[in-house]
Amino acid sequence: MLVPNDLPWHKTCDVAIIGYGMAGAVAAITAHDAGAKVIILEKQPADTHCTASSMSSGTFVCPNDVQGAITYLKTLWKVSDDLYWTPPDIIEAWAIYASQNKDWMEKLGAKLRLVRKGGEHPGVPGADSIELWSFRGLGLPMMEMLYGHIKARGIEVVYSTPARELLTNLRGEVIGVMAKDGMGEAVSVKALRGVILCCGGFEYNEEMKLQYLKVYPSWFDAHPANTGDGVKMAMKVGADLWHMNCVSARFAAKFPGFPAPFKFDFGGKGWITRLSHDQETAHPCGFIITDRYGRRYTNENFRVHSVYYETTSFDTHRLEYPRVPSYFIFDRVRMASGPLVQTHSGPAGPHRLYTWSPDNSAELRRGWITEGKTVGELARKLGMTPSVLRNTIGSWNGYCENGADPKFGRNPRELVPLNNPPFYAVQLLPGGANTQGGPRRNKLAQIVDPDGKPIPGLYEAGELGSVYGMINPAGGCNLAECIAFGRIAGENAAKEEARSE
Ligand SMILES: Cc1cc2nc3c(=O)[nH]c(=O)nc-3n(C[C@H](O)[C@H](O)[C@H](O)COP(=O)(O)OP(=O)(O)OC[C@H]3O[C@@H](n4cnc5c(N)ncnc54)[C@H](O)[C@@H]3O)c2cc1C
């Protein structure tokens, strides 16, 4: 919006940051340490502030070899000779900065542990360069450490104040932000050097999800405050969009009566987090995944951050997505081996938005889990033809006996039969951690227009307009990007010449 001549400025800073998740915190610390006066505007109130970053597992990627990481990402995202999901110069900027992530976090006092070596797609060249590091204590303490640094630097955080519009001068440069405070009063913030959008994705905007994602509905466990505000604000000042149909997602456990979806622990005792990576130490309980008709359709040892795309198959005769919903099917053994969802991150994690019962009994009573004394009874309750589910489970048990899954090649260590009644099912919906789309950025974290020209004074970092294309390279990549591009955006915004109206 063109700034009105008579607009009173309520606050003035060098760099205004919109959104106080990890990207916002890193960008704020970086811009402040480069000499800029920084203000953070945050939509949520202080006392209930909760973000995807604070709900996360606090795991981030730090490549151990820049060239290897460049090779890995270029291979994953190259579509043809000159067409990439993300241009090579941006991949290079990511690899250089992300390889410093561990050092940068340790300088702030983070205590880290190496979780895993190797990307999510082990056969792809360069995958060995990827290392995953985790903040000891996970996402909430990680964010508390960053909040401490913001406070120690005296950076002003204005809570309950969602940004609504970017303000531009006659030259089309972004020179400020219009927000609304907790009482609904307008707050105008002048930003002399730049505005950095760090306000997350569009996980809770139904219209955007319908129009942009490959399957609907899709459910995400980020915070409901992430309603794509940054997408709209940037579009209004001429931004191009990218990666709008890309997600980091698998299956979401979304139940009636609770707003946010949970993350599954399919095999029990945290096995899901070791899926595809550490199969030698994985000891899952028996389980399978079926479509809505009771048919298996994938190797359940799936790629954790991209299996979502398998749910997008559409039946043009029936006019439906046969894999929406899918079902997580198991027996008494898995039921008795601990919570069906992860309790180290997400709504049942340290924020304790929901306390999941240790034996799943409360959720069975709530009707979130369906029980059948026999496979046929379970199928009837799910609206499936009983013979179809009986055949599926019969074949599965046969594969387990033979030690080989000829249909989808499941790891023999996971061929555990389903023969301990009662039998159970939980509905699986496409979804997971986050959307990746938003305004297109360049290697300096500047938001660009459809011709690739930077919109002066406008930057972004984090999952809003993420650099990640369709295939997510590894768990830990989103926080890696918050650190890497938070730093790039903070450095470059702080360096700008002060602008006038
Ligand atoms: C349960 C869970 C576990 C995850 N685990 C991991 C993991 O271990 N590793 C990993 O790499 N990724 C993980 N992810 C993904 C990762 O956490 C997110 O992609 C990342 O934290 C996004 O950070 P962000 O700073 O971009 O946005 P967020 O952390 O989502 O912060 C956005 C902030 O912007 C605010 N905001 C929104 N609109 C406005 C507005 N108009 N004005 C002002 N403020 C606004 C929001 O209130 C919020 O505070 C996980 C995600 C979830 C949900």
Image (spheres, rainbow, N blue to C red):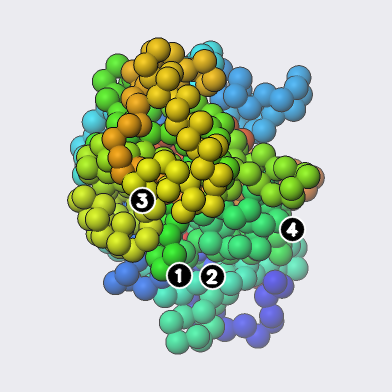
Three-letter amino acid code of the residue under disc 4: Gly
Report helix, strand or loop for mark 4: loop
Q: Amino acid at mark 3?
A: Glu
The residue under label 1 is which amino acid type?
Lys
Give the amino acid type for the residue marked by disc 2 in the picture: Ala
Left-right relation of 260 to 151:
right
- Which residue is labeled 4 in the image? 238
Residue 19 picture location, percent across and down: 46, 61
Label 3 belongs to which residue? 371
- For label 2, being within 8 Å of ligand 1 is answered yes
Q: What x and y, as percent, mark residue 279?
A: 34, 20
Nearest the eye: 17 or 437: 437
Disc 2 versus disc 4: distance between alpha carbons?
17 Å
**N-terminal-most mark, 4 or 1:** 1
Can residue 86 be seen in the rendering of this structure?
yes
Element marked by disc 3 = strand
Closest to the observer: 50 or 68? 50
The answer to whether the residue bearing label 1 lies less than 8 angstroms from the nearest atom of ligand 1 is yes
| Sequence-earlier tag: 2 or 4 | 2
| Residue receiving disc 1 | 43
Image x and y of residue 211, in percent:
70, 56
Q: Are marks 2 and 1 in contact (CB under 8 Å)?
A: yes
